[in-house]
Amino acid sequence: MTRFHSSLLGADHRIAEFDCGNEALNGWLRDSAGRAHAAGVSRVTVWNEIGAPGAVAAYYSLSPTQLASREGLSRSVSGGFTVVPAWLLGRLAVDRRYQHQGVGRQVLIDAIETVVSLADKAGGRLIVVDPIDQAAARWYETFGFAPFGTDEAERPARRYLRIDRAVASLRQAAKQ
Ligand SMILES: CC(C)(COP(=O)(O)OP(=O)(O)OC[C@H]1O[C@@H](n2cnc3c(N)ncnc32)[C@H](O)[C@@H]1OP(=O)(O)O)[C@@H](O)C(=O)NCCC(=O)NCCS
């Protein structure tokens, strides 16, 4: 039986109560997500446990983006294009109460499936993530996301997943 319900961010979601343990990600949901969502800058998807409507169990944000091949993309990744259309998974977080239960993995799979479906209709070659810290970066790598660019001194490098390989990556991740 499905445990969670997924919907776009709405006025009924009690975003101030959300706590994933990372204040930057809590604060973005609380202070900026509604504005970004309403303006169409990004779309925010919220998961809540069935039977607990309004209580945010997890969220992620998606937006269209583009990368320049000179940002450190190899030719096989850029496809030989100077400008590469992509989808940015800007933020993803799970409330502490639901962490270490496989929810993050399910939410990431939901986000990737959404992008695969969008790309089928609207294009886009890569899914890009900005890991909040090195632990998050390693977590994304378990799903096949690879770093690009070189400078990891200040913060983790961005990670990408080729959309045409995302389905295979998801199948692989599901086996782990
Ligand atoms: C990262 C986060 C999304 C994971 O959510 P979650 O629901 O706990 O994840 P899951 O239960 O699906 O997966 C956890 C498993 O992934 C693996 N994992 C977790 N962190 C890992 C890491 N740094 N490296 C490799 N594998 C890792 C482990 O197998 C872990 O199993 P465990 O819980 O038994 O230790 C959640 O902890 C979170 O919101 N953290 C704060 C915000 C954040 O870091 N977001 C990342 C995106 S910027």
Image (cartoon, grey):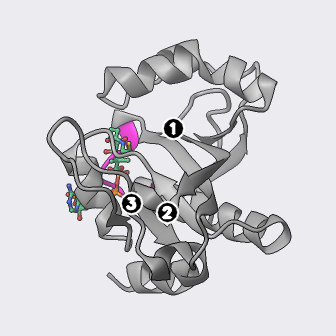
Left or right, 46 with respect to 17, comes to right
Left or right, 98 with respect to 153, comes to right
Residue hosting label 1: 57
User: Which of the 4 quarters of the picture holds residue 141?
Assistant: bottom left
**What's drawn in magenta, residue-wise?**
97-103
Q: Is 143 located above or below residue 159 in the figure?
A: below
Residue hosting label 2: 69
Give the alpha-carbon distance from disc 2 to disc 1, as whole Å. 36 Å
Residue at the spot 63% in from the left edge and 48% down from the top edge = 65
Q: Residues within 10 Å of mark 1 (few under 14, many from 20)?
A: many
Residue at the spot 79% in from the left edge and 32% down from the top edge = 40
Residue at the spot 44% in from the left edge and 55% down from the top edge = 103
User: Which of the 4 quarters of the picture holds residue 72?
Assistant: bottom left
Left or right, 48 with respect to 25, comes to right
Kind of residue at disc 1: Ala
Q: Nearer the viewer, residue 2 or 96?
A: 96
Q: Nearer the viewer, residue 62 or 149?
A: 149
Kind of residue at disc 2: Ser
Q: Which mark is residue 102?
A: 3
Q: Picture coordinates of residue 31 (x, y %)?
A: 56, 12
Tell me: is circle 3 under 8 Å from ligand 1.
yes
